[in-house]
């Protein structure tokens, strides 16, 4: 399946002096993408899983000299490495801090080494690196679950994507049967999410949502929770679990600004903040900050005490909430469909800027503020076809933005300077 990150990998080929590090949560497809890239672009390819190949892990404990490392890998793997046409993929590199440190010396070497690496919880490892992380010596790229456009590409819906893009630009409504087709695919995405394993299973099930093996989502969540215990101290692992499992409850609150008291009765910021940082660094959670002023740069006006949390994959949120897929497909649970919709928008927007913001004023709330072509644009999110909103109308009246965006199940349109964008077209936002 095609992933947008492949374009970044191709660009790296033109300037591969720095080792490349692919960061992302477990099961987002890092190993698959790098395997495919290495096989398609190099005559010779060496894969090393540092979590399983302890003998090579020990090499890094003994030396971080690139020439010596390559020499020892040749002996252990019984291969001859021609560095000009060979790429080395160090998977699960988070288990060896020395291996990460060695990337600096691979970068500084006069020889043209081709090194890529990946691993679960690399974001956490980077944030908690005990020695000096090789800043400026490693090209870091982030891989998130498949977004809605990648999902459509996997389903072979290239023509539908282009049709959506065209109507986003013109604001002209799609023909009703095409609009309804796109909405149906969108609702199924709310259920599946963007984990490649689920999308593959959906395709293997002949696009019949009833035949999807949803236990795969449960297995991913179980693996996430296991990582929290494996790579943390006991008390922190427990707190990580509590925060992660509290998200469905947090998001169903009318005012879903995160509160530590929802996590546990005795939860306080001073005790749980490091656990929250761990979950954010692991890319398991996404953070949306409240801004005190709707001015550029938004980051300068963040209220550090008020924020919302979303799961990094909408399908995992459905599974964690134990919500039957039919309730979404058949529109039987409007309340929680709204929760999933807001989480979906966060997952679509976050990978582009690594920032999410919302705004409160005069007892009203704007779901998201984003910058488009230098302008601060308010975004209102509606999970259904009803689009009446006092909050957005009051915002327009008070601040007179260049234009506004309303995301809903309604078709494309432009009225009263409000751009109506169907939920399936969020990927079109520049």
Image: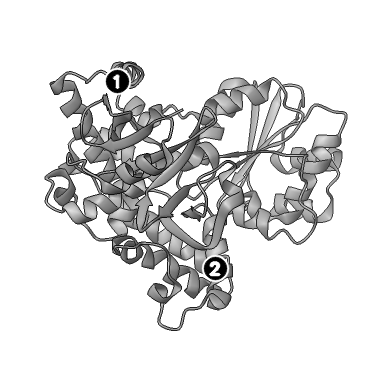
Q: Check if mark 2's residue and mark 1's residue have beta carbons within 8 Å.
A: no
Image coords of residue 283 (percent x, y): 51, 52
Residue at 52%, 40% in the rendered image:
143
- Going by the image, does 224 lie left or right of 181? right
Q: Is residue 329 above or below residue 419?
A: below
Of 254 and 71, which appears nearest the observer? 254
The image's mark for residue 89 is: none
Which residue, given by chain and number where applicable, does mark 1 sit on?
A: 171
Counting residues from the start of the chain, the first of labels 2 and 1 encountered is 1
Residue found 18% across the figure and 22% down from its top: 178
Q: Residue 292, image x and y in percent? A: 52, 54
Query: Quick one: label 2, few (<14), some, or many (20+) residues within 10 Å?
Result: many
Give the x, y percent position of residue 380.
33, 42
What is the distance, in whole Å, between disc 2 and disc 1 at their CAs? 44 Å
Q: What residue do we see at 15% from left, 51% from top?
A: 327
Q: Is residue 161 left or right of residue 131?
A: left
Q: Which residue is mark 2?
A: 275
Question: Which of pointers 2 and 1 indicates the residue nearer the eye?
Answer: 1
The quadrant the N terminus occupies is top left
Looking at the rendering, which quadrant does residue 149 occupy?
A: top left
């Amino acid at each position: 399946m095609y992933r947008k990150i492949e374009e970044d990998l191709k660009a790296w080929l033109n300037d591969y002096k720095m080792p490349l590090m692919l960061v992302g949560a477990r099961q987002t497809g890092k190993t698959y993408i790098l395997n495919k890239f290495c096989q398609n672009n190099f005559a010779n390819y060496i894969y090393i899983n540092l979590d399983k190949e302890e003998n090579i892990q020990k090499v890094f404990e003994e030396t971080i000299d690139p020439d010596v490392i390559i020499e020892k890998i040749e002996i252990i793997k019984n291969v001859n490495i021609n560095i000009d046409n060979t790429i080395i993929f160090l998977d699960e590199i988070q288990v060896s801090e020395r291996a990460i440190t060695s990337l600096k010396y691979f970068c500084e070497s006069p020889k043209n080494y081709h090194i890529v690496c990946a691993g679960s919880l690399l974001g956490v490892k980077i944030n908690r690196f005990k020695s000096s992380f090789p800043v400026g010596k490693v090209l870091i790229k982030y891989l998130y679950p498949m977004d809605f456009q990648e999902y459509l590409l996997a389903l072979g819906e290239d023509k539908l994507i282009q049709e959506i893009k065209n109507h986003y630009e013109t604001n002209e409504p799609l023909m009703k049967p095409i609009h309804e087709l796109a909405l149906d695919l969108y609702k199924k995405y709310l259920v599946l999410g963007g984990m490649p394993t689920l999308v593959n299973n959906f395709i293997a099930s002949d696009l019949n949502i009833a035949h999807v093996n949803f236990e795969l989502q449960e297995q991913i969540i179980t693996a996430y929770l296991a990582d929290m215990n494996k790579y943390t101290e006991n008390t922190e692992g427990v707190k990580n679990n509590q925060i992660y499992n509290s998200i469905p409850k947090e998001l169903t609150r009318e005012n879903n600004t995160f509160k530590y008291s929802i996590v546990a009765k005795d939860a306080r910021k001073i005790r749980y903040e490091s656990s929250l940082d761990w979950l954010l660094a692991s890319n398991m959670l996404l953070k949306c900050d409240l801004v005190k002023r709707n001015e550029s740069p938004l980051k300068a006006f963040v209220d550090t005490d008020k924020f919302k949390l979303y799961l990094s994959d909408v399908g995992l949120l459905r599974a964690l909430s134990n919500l039957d897929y039919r309730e979404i497909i058949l529109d039987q649970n409007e309340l929680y469909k709204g929760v999933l919709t807001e989480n979906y928008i966060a997952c679509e927007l976050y990978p582009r800027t690594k920032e999410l913001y919302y705004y409160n004023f005069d007892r009203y709330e704007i779901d998201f503020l984003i910058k488009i072509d230098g302008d601060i644009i308010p975004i209102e999110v509606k999970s259904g076809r009803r689009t009446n909103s006092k909050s957005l109308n009051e915002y327009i009246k008070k601040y007179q933005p260049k234009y506004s965006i309303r995301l809903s199940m309604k078709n494309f349109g432009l009225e009263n300077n409000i751009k109506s964008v169907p939920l399936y077209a969020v990927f079109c936002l520049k």
